[in-house]
Each structure stands twice: as structure tokens, then as C-alpha cells.
């Protein structure tokens, strides 16, 4: 049985992302659906493609470096880069069921 190191690192990165919050919404950025991709290279470099709830989000300048810093702190990660995109635009349908419950959408 072969151990998938990239998958293990990806899972750890996702756990870290679940500790990052938009200060205006009491749900983590992963459950909010702000994370579009988590890619781990052969050299354990992590690239995260994410969006924000809106282009004018007040944490647009601070959230990406905070996320990079937290992911980079994982012992297995060589480097971390967050890329912001607004394609496709975020909407509430991207939220997990848990996030919708937490925010009272049910």
C-alpha cells in the first residue's frame, strides 16, 4: 500500500483552512465555499485558489497573507501561495450544508 503524501498534506491544509474565518461571518472560509482549489506540488508547495464574498470585501488585503501564513506553518509544507479569483463569483450556493445551518438558512 502506497502512502499518498500529497493527499495527506492536502487534508492537513484543509484542516488549517477550517480555522480561518471571515471576521464578518461566523463560519470558516472552507465551509463558506471560498476555497475553489487546493493543489500540492511534488515539492510540497501549496497553491490555493480562493475567492471572497465580494470584490469589495474589507479583508481582501489581509485574509490571503493570513491564510498563506497559517498553511506555511505546517511542517510538511515548503511554501504557500493564495491566488484570489472572482470567476466564478461566490454565491451562497457554494456554502456547505453545515455553513447554511450555522447561518440559519434552513
Image (cartoon, rainbow, N blue to C red):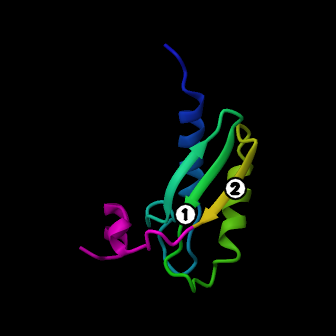
Residue 2 vs residue 74, the one in the foreground: 2
Q: Residue at x 65, y 47 (%)?
A: 46
Name above or below for residue 14 compared with residue 35. Answer: above
The image shows residue 38 at horizontal and vertical percentages of 55, 49
Specify few, some or many for label 2: CA neighbours under 10 Å numbering under 14, 14-19, or 20 or more.
Answer: some
Q: Which residues are magenta?
A: 85-106
Farthest residue toward the left?
A: 106
Corner quadrant of residue 102: bottom left
Residue 42 vs residue 72, the one in the foreground: 42
Q: Which residue is mark 1?
A: 50
72 left or right, relative to 100:
right
Cα distance between the residues tagged 2 and 1: 11 Å
Q: Secondary structure at mark 1?
A: strand
The image shows residue 37 at horizontal and vertical percentages of 51, 53
Farthest residue toward the front?
A: 87
Corner quadrant of residue 62: bottom right
The image shows residue 34 at horizontal and vertical percentages of 49, 66
Q: Which residue is mark 2?
A: 81
Amino acid at each position: 500500500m502506497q502512502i499518498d503524501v500529497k493527499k495527506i498534506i492536502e487534508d492537513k491544509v484543509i484542516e488549517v483552512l477550517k480555522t480561518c474565518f471571515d471576521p464578518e461571518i461566523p463560519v470558516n472560509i472552507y465551509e463558506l465555499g471560498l476555497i475553489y482549489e487546493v493543489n500540492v506540488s511534488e515539492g510540497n508547495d501549496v497553491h490555493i485558489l480562493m475567492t471572497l464574498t465580494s470584490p469589495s470585501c474589507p479583508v481582501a488585503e489581509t485574509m490571503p497573507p493570513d491564510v498563506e501564513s497559517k498553511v506555511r506553518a505546517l511542517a510538511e509544507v515548503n511554501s504557500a501561495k493564495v491566488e484570489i479569483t472572482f470567476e466564478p463569483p461566490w454565491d451562497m450556493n457554494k456554502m456547505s450544508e453545515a455553513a447554511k445551518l450555522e447561518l440559519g438558512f434552513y
